[in-house]
Amino acid sequence: MSKKNLSQKLQKVLANQGLGSRRTMEKWISEGRIRVNGEVATLGDRVEDDDTIQVDGRTLSQKKTRHRHLLYNKPAGEICSRDDPEGRPSVYRKLPKLRSQRWISIGRLDFNTSGLLLFTTDGALANKLMHPSTGIDREYAVRVLGHVSDKALQNMRDGVMLEDGVAKFTDIQKSPESDGANQWYYVVLMEGKNREVRRLWESQGLTVSRLKRVRFGSFFVPSSVKVGRFVELEKPEIDDLYELTKIEESSGDP
């Protein structure tokens, strides 16, 4: 096999090191923060194992990285960004500290949404899991204020035009816990547009008073992981995580 066939896209190598998503790495390359063999890198560059890569002047080791993955039970009242001008608490403040890697959130939950949130240091994995083409189910428990008509439910199953395109639930089930004005539903969708669950209900004149993600693909929050706590995934769970994307651990598409 020739050396050329062993080369990989620069942004893939950087993402696999846990520095961030491929999109973020492409931005860093465009900003001139990356050098390869002493030269400022450009988008489209490919690298090999013996190339020297520098990020902000620091030499990056290309040794195979052992990635870490965890499941966090997010409380309402935390943001999924590292920094916030308003000073609101971030989900990252409770995660284990890393020396040469970076936690990447697999999707986001908005400030007032609680529940299951996955993190990884594998940028290629995160990128694949978040891509709409992967078609991973996301299930939410939703408390809705007001009368929910059969017509409204059917509209949300068929698809509703929102400002950023058509959105719909692939499944809606009423919870037996519903009582009086508090109507609880379990809804499933296959992508994660900003505030998509809330906006779908709002399109039918209904208000979501509580929202919790209860499932991502085959992952649920274990009863032992209380709100505000996390658990590191074990080997069988990590295998399941990679199986959702059909990519091999610590690798990605070239």
Image (cartoon, rainbow, N blue to C red):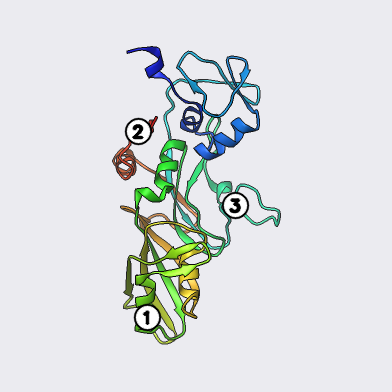
The residue where tag 3 is placed is: 90
- Residue 217 in the image: state x and y as whole percent: 33, 53
Name the residue nearer the viewer: 120 or 11: 11
The residue where tag 1 is placed is: 178
Q: Which mark is residue 249?
A: 2
Q: State the quadrant of the N terminus.
A: top left
Question: Is 242 rendered above or below residue 84?
Answer: above
Q: Earlier in the sequence, mark 1 or mark 2?
A: 1
Circle 3: element type: loop
1 and 3 marks in contact (CB < 8 Å): no
Q: Which three-letter amino acid code belongs to the residue tagged 2? A: Glu
Question: Is 234 rendered above or below residue 215?
Answer: above
- Residue in the picture at 38% in, 84% down: 149
- Residue in the picture at 46% in, 69% down: 161
Question: Is 26 rendered above or below residue 210?
Answer: above
Q: CA distance from mark 2 to mark 3?
A: 28 Å
Please indicate whether residue 29 sits to the left or right of residue 51 in the image.
right
- Residue 209 in the image: state x and y as whole percent: 51, 75
Q: Which three-letter amino acid code belongs to the residue tagged 1? A: Ser
Circle 2: element type: loop
